Every structure is written in C-alpha cells, then in structure tokens.
C-alpha cells in the first residue's frame, strides 16, 4: 500500500485483541507500511501497544494520527467487570430492563435462564416524571427529587449512573435537566442519558443500551485516558481517533462519553478492510472472516456495501442484552487459536469459548499453559511450523502441545492424539461456519454466491476448511492477514450516525417535515466533523428508513437514495421496501400499505486512503527460493509431505496446487489437497477450493 500526500504525518493504527496487539503504521510521505505484532498485556493494555509500535520500527512522536480499535468494551460486558451502576427511570417502569421481551427460544429447556441485567434491581430507581409520546410533558420533573437521588447514590458508592425517561426520543428536556443536576452533585461519577445514544422508541432496548454505556463507561474512559496520556508523554501531538462499531472513526473525547459505540470496534475494521480490497478487485459480494486468538467473527459485503444493523444482542439470543446503536452486522463465536478444548461430563468434546489468552496462552507457547487449544492441535497436525511462528520470534513447543492433547483429550476419550487434534479442528470449523451463516443465510443470502476473505492470525489456517463446510468455492487471503484489522483502520472515515423515531404511514408522508428532521441530524454530523483536527476531503450523507407493513411489529431497514426524497417519490420508496422485505423473508406484499418508524442518516467525512501496491509479476511456478522446506502435515487422517512456501517470495501469477503451506510473519495459509492458489496482481492469495468448483 502506498499513498502520495503532502503531509509529513505518519498514521498509527492499533488493534488490541484478546491474544495479540497488532500495529499498522503508514507513512503518507513515502508510502511505506510498517507492521508490528506483540502479545496483548491484559493488566496494562498500553504496554502491548507500545511493544507493537517498537516492533514496527517507529514511535508515537512521529505520528500525526493515532487510530485505535479495542475489545475492551465488549469484554467488560461479557466478563461482568464493569462499574457499580445505577439506573434512574420513569416511575412505573423500573422492571422493564429485567422483564425484557420475554423471549423463550427453548420452550422445553427446564434449565433455561434469561438475561441477567447489568444493573441489579436494588440500584434501579423510579423518578416521578412523565413525557407523552407526542413530546408533551404530562408530569414535570422535580429538581429536588434528583437532588435526593444524588445524595442516595453517593451514599451507595455508585460509580456510574444511567438515565432513561419515557419518550425522551421526542423530548429530551427531562433527561438533560437530570444529567445537569447529577453532574454538579456527583463529580467523578460517570453520567449518561439514553437520548445521547439512541433516539429510537422501544424502552427496553434503550434502557439496556444506556445501562451498558454506564456500566462500561468508567473502565473504558479510564483506559482511553491512559492511552491518551501515554501518547502525550511519548511526544504524540496529533489526533487520537477511535473506531466505532460502524467502522467509522470518532474522536477520543466522544468515545469516552459514548463508550458503547465501541462494542465491535476491532472486528469492524476488518470488515472495512475487506470492503476496500473487494472494491479494488471489483468483487461485489464477500464474507469477511476474522479468526484471531480468542474469537472468530464474520461480516458481509453485499452489492459492494457493508451490511449494518440498528441493534445487536450481546450474549446470544437466549440471554441477550440488546444494544440499540448502528453497527456493522457482525456475528461472533468463541473460537480462536487460543480456544481451549475439554472433555465435558458424558464424554463430549467441547472447544471454547474459554480461551488461554495471551498469558499463559496455548500449551505450545511454553508459558505454563497446560490446556490444549486449537493452536496446539494445528501444531501437532503439522499445519504450523514450530520454528517459523511469528517469523521465528516465538518458538513453539510441540512436546508441550502433545502432552496437553494426550492428558486432557486423547487419554480420557481413549484415542490417539492425532484423532484428538483432528476432532478439535473439526468442531472448531463447524462452530465457525455458524458465524458465517448467521450473517448470510439468516439474512436471506446464498452463501455460495460469496467469496470468503479470511484474515486474522488464525483465519488463513482454517479458511479452506470453513469454505468446504459452507459450500463456498473461492477464498481470498489478503496481504498481511495477521494485521488486517489494524490496516483496515487506515481505510476508515470519520462517521456520525443519527436516528430519529417518527411514526408515519407512507401514504401520509410529509416530505418537508422529514427533510427538516434529516437536515437537523445531518447538521449535527457536519458540525462534529468540522470540529475535529483531521482534514477531510469530502463529506457524504447516506439516508435510510426503518419500515414495516401496517400491522407488523418488526422493522426492515433499507437505504433510500436522495432522489427519492428530492422527487417525493413514495412509489419508489415502497418498491425498495417490498424488494428488501422479499430478500430478507422470502415474501412481500406490494398491495399492502407500509409505514415508517424511524429515520436514519450517516454523515461521513472522507479521509485520504492508502493505495494498494502492485506486486511484481512472475511465472506460473514460484521461484525456487520461494520454497523453504517440506512439512509432514496431516490431511484426512494421514500425514503427507507438504511443501512450505515463503509468501514474501511469491510473485503475481504464481500458481500452487495443494497440499501446501504458505508461511508469513503472522499467519500460515493451509492449502488442502486439490486446492489451487493463484497470486493476484495485488499480492492476494486467491484459492479455488478443491471439490467445490
């Protein structure tokens, strides 16, 4: 990748995962892309960033822009390590956060348990105020009541306060007043209100969102401040931007207040990078498949656009805590290189979601780990090189991996360690295929129409196996797959998303009223972009609507071209809705009336992008120097002599027929027998999956 730019700035991008911290440093002056990878440091995450920057051969002082994505927000919720939080809510609605939607997906499961709120009932307090759905005040807020609550919260040692008042999406005055009083009386306490995060209806979803923001707020804000202070001490004087779940960027001071927008911060960058690669190659439909050390994630590029959603369920459908903010539609499973394999009661083999993490890590890391992991299984099967892992920086211990597999899996199940290792990989591949189906088949998309773009340190190891499981015929491994999400931040833009609930039947739509709402929301986005210290080339606006047929409950979100609003074309909007409904659910009702529930707009400030570097051309066969050894690798239960190639020595046009291993600093690509790989002009490995053509 390279870019010509008059600025002297160096862009630093840091992606912190559960096991590794990845750094991508792009020099706009000379087009150099520098990469660094270090073990994550759970107790002091900034140390992992610093180590990665040092390994990339650069420093903070030379950078004019620091971009950051992290899993700290989502991990704080999943691990239940957030702040002691209180929720102030309209009188009579104290329990909606716990009651939820009364989902019972498994009706006959006697051991079913529903979601567990982040805020216990004893810390949810009712406030005597009430707003009507029209925005009119039914019962006024009393300042003295909020003052009394502030004193109570102080006595209780509350660290964060979430405020949700009914229908604040139409009139936020009560929430604003309550926040002002609480901030004055509770200095140092994290205060957040629901209308700042979501101006949609659905009180349960909004209460869950604001509670989550408060719960993670102190930890995430402290973490971001720590990084900011470290950057300043290191001589960094540029702009610090954070990746949102939409893949867009916003400033650090905004991220400290609206932390919940960072939930899918790291994974979103990989999807943005996938979109950039696909645009360069003219690929319209792609699955972004990211497998790291702790989890595997999947997102979708459809018709060249990243598929997004207006809400996510944290913790799975059964025990879900909904988060109602715009984000890339990403599904995640607890299957990564460090995922632990274990024999459960009854003799069933399980893989994940528990992870060995960075410390002690897989048994083969030699740091005291005793539990077998997916990485250990790959090493035993000969798919990883003990000598060349991380370019030789970390030597893997095969004996420790074999011992862990035998002790914990093979011996209890009465099998040999090779069968145990294959069983672990088979289970992991099946689980990862579920993640892909959740963002394709579940949305009415045929997974066979997509190319699988695999990245992350462990993605290329399993990409062709996952493709076989799904029936996907083509796989693409981008350059630097182990740093791909960090590189994706270099393709991100400033972005601000807004939504406003406004129920209107399509036949009665007042375009002037909607235009006023859109203009107001988009003006906020333009102002936010103008106030940043980052130069943007252009500002773009994209509009969408949440719609349904009259009488339906659930909504379909669809993009609407500006021409539909300019020409006041109701018929075109209805046609777009019918088409999207047909795609999602396999049916539509063109003769039925439709209604609009919410308006959405995304305001984007485009940043300069790196250009993709072309690779030198070579012949059909790789040069002799590209081949650097032969491994005994297990495929279909037997070991085969498998050539290993140095990816850095491959040239455009080179063709390799599997079985083969393609090794590089932070990843290894596995070609199974009959797979055919061709290196394209940009250096991507394009694989035709054997038996799927």
Image (spheres, helix red, strand yellow):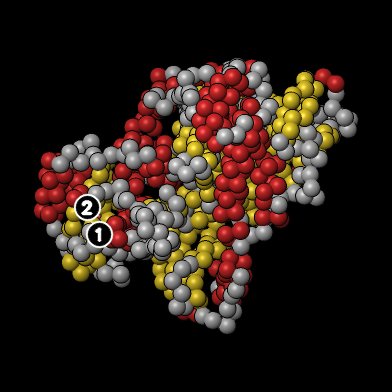
Q: Is residue 581 visible?
A: yes
Q: Is residue 279 visible?
A: no
Side of 150 relative to 374 (left or right):
left
Distance between the alpha carbons at the discs numbered 2 and 1:
8 Å
| Viewer-nearest residue: 408 or 413 | 413
Side of 302 relative to 201 (left or right):
right
Side of 649 relative to 420 (left or right):
right
Residue name at image x 32 percent, y 51 percent: 116
Give the position of the N terminus as an image quadrant.
top right
Residues marked 2 and 1 touching at CB (< 8 Å): yes
Residue name at image x 12 percent, y 54 percent: 145
Give the labeled residue for mark 2: 121
Side of 525 relative to 489 (left or right):
left
Which x, y percent locates residue 120? Answer: 24, 49
Q: Which mark is residue 563?
A: none
- Disc 2 is placed on an element classified as helix
Of the numbered discs 2 and 1, the one sitting upstream in the chain is 1
Which x, y percent locates residue 544? Answer: 52, 62
- Disc 1 is placed on an element classified as loop
Quadrant of residue 684 within the rendered picture:
top right
Residue 605, above or below 320:
above
Give the labeled residue for mark 1: 95
């Amino acid at each position: 990748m390279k870019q010509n730019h008059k600025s002297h700035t160096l862009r630093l991008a840091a992606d912190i995962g559960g096991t590794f911290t990845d750094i991508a440093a792009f020099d706009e002056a000379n087009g150099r892309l520098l990469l660094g990878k270090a073990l994550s440091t759970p107790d002091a995450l900034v140390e992992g960033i610093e180590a990665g920057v040092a390994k990339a051969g650069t420093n903070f002082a030379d950078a004019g822009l620091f971009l950051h994505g992290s899993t700290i927000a989502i991990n704080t919720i999943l691990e239940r390590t957030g702040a002691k939080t209180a929720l102030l809510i309209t009188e009579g609605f104290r329990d909606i956060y716990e009651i939820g939607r009364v989902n019972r997906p498994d009706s006959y499961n006697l051991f079913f348990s529903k979601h567990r709120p982040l805020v216990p009932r004893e810390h949810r307090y009712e406030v005597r105020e009430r707003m009507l759905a029209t925005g009119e005040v039914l019962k006024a807020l009393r300042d003295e009541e909020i003052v009394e609550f502030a004193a109570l919260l102080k006595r209780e040692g509350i660290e964060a306060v979430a405020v949700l008042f009914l229908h604040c999406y139409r009139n936020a005055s009560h929430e604003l007043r309550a926040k002002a009083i609480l901030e004055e009386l509770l200095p140092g306490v994290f205060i957040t209100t629901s209308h700042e995060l979501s101006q949609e209806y659905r009180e349960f979803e909004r209460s869950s969102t604001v509670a989550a923001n408060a719960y993670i707020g102190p930890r995430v804000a402290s973490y971001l401040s720590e990084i900011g202070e470290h950057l300043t001490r290191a001589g960094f004087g540029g702009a610090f931007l954070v990746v949102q779940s939409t893949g867009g960027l916003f400033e650090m001071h905004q991220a400290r207040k609206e932390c919940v927008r960072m939930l899918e911060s790291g994974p979103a960058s990989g999807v943005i990078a996938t979109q950039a690669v696909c645009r360069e190659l003219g690929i319209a439909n792609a699955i972004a498949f990211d497998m790291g050390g702790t989890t595997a994630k999947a997102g979708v590029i459809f018709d060249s656009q990243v598929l997004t959603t207006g809400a996510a369920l944290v913790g799975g459908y059964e025990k879900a805590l909904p988060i109602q903010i715009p984000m890339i539609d990403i599904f995640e499973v607890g299957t990564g290189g460090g995922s632990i394999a274990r024999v459960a009661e009854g003799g069933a083999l399980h893989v994940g979601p528990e992870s060995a993490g960075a410390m002690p890590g897989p048994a083969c890391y030699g740091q005291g780990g005793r539990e077998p992991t997916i990485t250990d299984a790959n090493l035993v099967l000969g798919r990883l090189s003990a000598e060349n892992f991380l370019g030789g920086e970390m030597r893997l211990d095969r004996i420790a991996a074999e011992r862990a597999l035998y002790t914990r899996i093979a011996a209890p199940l009465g099998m040999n360690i090779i069968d145990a290792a294959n069983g672990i990989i088979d289970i992991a591949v099946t689980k990862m295929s579920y993640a892909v189906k959740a963002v394709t088949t579940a949305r009415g998309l045929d997974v066979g129409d997509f190319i699988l773009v695999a990245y992350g340190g462990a993605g290329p190891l399993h990409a062709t196996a996952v493709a076989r499981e799904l029936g996907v015929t083509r796989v693409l491994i981008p350059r630097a797959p182990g740093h791909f999400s960090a590189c994706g931040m270099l393709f991100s833009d400033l972005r601000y998303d807004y939504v406003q609930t406004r129920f209107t039947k399509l036949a009665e739509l007042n375009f002037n009223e909607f235009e006023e709402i859109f203009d107001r929301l988009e003006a906020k986005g333009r102002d936010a972009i103008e106030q940043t210290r980052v130069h943007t080339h252009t500002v773009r606006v994209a509009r969408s609507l949440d719609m349904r047929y009259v009488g339906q409950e659930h909504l379909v979100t669809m993009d609407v071209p500006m021409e539909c609003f300019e020409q006041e074309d109701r018929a075109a909007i209805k046609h777009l809705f019918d088409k999207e409904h047909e795609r999602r659910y396999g049916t539509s009702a063109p003769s039925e009336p439709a209604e609009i529930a919410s308006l959405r707009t995304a305001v984007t400030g485009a940043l300069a992008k790196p250009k993709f570097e072309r690779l030198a051309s070579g012949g059909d066969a790789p040069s002799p120097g590209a081949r650097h050894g032969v491994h005994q690798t297990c495929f279909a239960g037997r070991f085969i002599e498998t050539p290993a190639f140095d990816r850095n020595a491959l040239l455009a046009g080179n063709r390799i027929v599997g079985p083969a291993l393609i090794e590089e600093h932070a990843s290894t690509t596995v070609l199974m027998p009959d797979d055919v790989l061709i290196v394209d002009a940009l250096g991507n490995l394009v694989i035709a999956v054997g038996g799927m053509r």
